[in-house]
Image: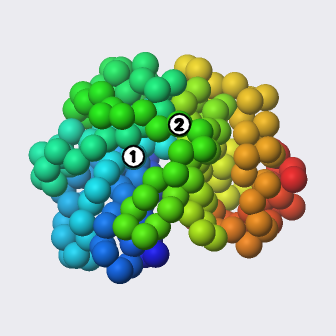
C-alpha cells in the first residue's frame, strides 16, 4: 500500500491517495479543493484512480469532486447516504464561510457500514462513525485508519454543525475506532498523523 497526503484548500483538509502498490489502483479520499493539484499528484505517481470517496459531506471534503471528475474522467463518487443533505448543500455551506466551491454531484453509490472496498489487492473496510455528521465514515486498511473528521491528533471533530451529536461521536470513537490495535496509524481529516494507542491515552476529549 502507498499513501500520499495532499493538504488542500484554506481549511487544509488532508486529501488521501490510498493506492495498491502493485497495480496503482487508487482510492481518492476527501477531495475537498485544489482539483488540479490532486490530479497532478495522481499523474506524477502513476496512479490509476478507481473512485472518489468522502468520509463525510461537509463542503471542505467534497468541493473538488466535480472539477476532479472533469480532469480524471467520470470515476465513481462514493459517500454515505445519511450525509446526502450536506452534499446537496455544500455550495451554500461554503458561502457561509465566504468560500466558493462548485455544486457537488450526487454520489454514484452509497457506502455502508461493514462494506469492504477492493482497491487492487487492497481491502478497505468502511465503518460508520457518526457524530461529526450523521453519515460520517472511517476507513480501515491494514495497520491504518482514515477517520475523516471523527478523530484528530489530541482532538475530535466538532459537533456544533448541522447533524452533529457529541454523545454519538464519543460512542463512535470508543466502540468503532479505539477497538483497533494500538499501533494503528491514524490519518485524520486535518492535521498530523497519530496512533490509536496515543489517542486512547492522551486525547483529552475521549479516553480509551
Name which residue lies at 74% across and 30% down: 168
Q: Are marks 2 and 1 in contact (CB under 8 Å)?
A: no
Disc 2: which residue: 112
Display coloring: rainbow
Residue sitting nearer the eye, 204 or 84: 84
Q: Residues within 10 Å of mark 1 (few under 14, many from 20)?
A: many
Q: Is residue 6 visible?
A: no
Residue sitting nearer the eye, 81 or 36: 81
Q: Position of residue 37 (x, y in %)?
A: 23, 61
Q: Secondary structure at mark 2?
A: loop
Q: Secondary structure at mark 1?
A: strand
Horizontal side of 107 relative to 184 (left or right) equals left
Q: Position of residue 179 (x, y in %)?
A: 79, 55
Horizontal side of 205 relative to 60 (left or right) equals right
Disc 1: which residue: 53
Q: Residue furthest bottom?
A: 22
Name which residue lies at 69% across and 45% down: 156
Name which residue lies at 12% across and 46% down: 70
Q: Which mark is residue 192?
A: none
Q: Earlier in the sequence, mark 2 or mark 1?
A: 1
Q: On screen, 177 above or below 185? A: above
Amino acid at each position: 500500500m502507498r499513501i500520499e497526503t495532499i493538504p488542500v484548500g484554506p481549511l487544509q483538509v488532508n486529501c488521501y491517495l490510498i493506492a495498491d502498490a502493485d497495480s496503482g489502483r487508487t482510492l481518492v479520499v476527501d477531495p475537498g479543493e485544489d482539483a488540479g493539484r490532486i490530479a497532478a499528484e495522481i499523474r506524477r505517481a502513476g496512479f490509476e484512480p478507481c473512485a472518489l470517496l468522502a468520509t463525510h459531506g461537509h463542503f471542505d471534503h467534497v468541493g473538488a469532486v466535480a472539477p476532479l471528475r472533469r480532469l480524471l474522467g467520470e470515476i465513481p463518487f462514493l459517500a454515505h447516504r445519511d450525509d446526502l443533505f450536506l452534499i446537496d448543500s455544500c455550495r451554500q455551506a461554503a458561502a457561509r464561510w465566504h468560500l466558493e466551491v462548485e455544486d457537488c454531484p450526487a454520489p454514484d453509490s452509497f457506502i455502508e457500514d461493514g462494506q469492504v472496498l477492493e482497491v487492487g489487492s487492497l481491502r478497505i473496510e468502511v465503518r460508520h462513525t457518526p457524530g461529526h455528521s450523521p453519515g460520517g465514515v472511517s476507513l480501515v486498511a491494514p495497520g491504518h485508519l482514515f477517520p475523516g473528521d471523527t478523530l484528530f491528533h489530541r482532538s475530535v471533530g466538532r459537533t456544533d454543525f448541522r447533524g452533529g451529536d457529541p454523545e454519538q461521536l464519543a460512542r463512535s470513537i470508543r466502540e468503532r475506532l479505539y477497538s483497533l490495535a494500538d499501533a494503528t496509524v491514524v490519518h485524520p481529516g486535518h492535521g498530523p498523523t497519530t496512533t490509536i494507542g496515543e489517542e486512547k491515552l492522551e486525547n483529552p476529549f475521549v479516553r480509551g
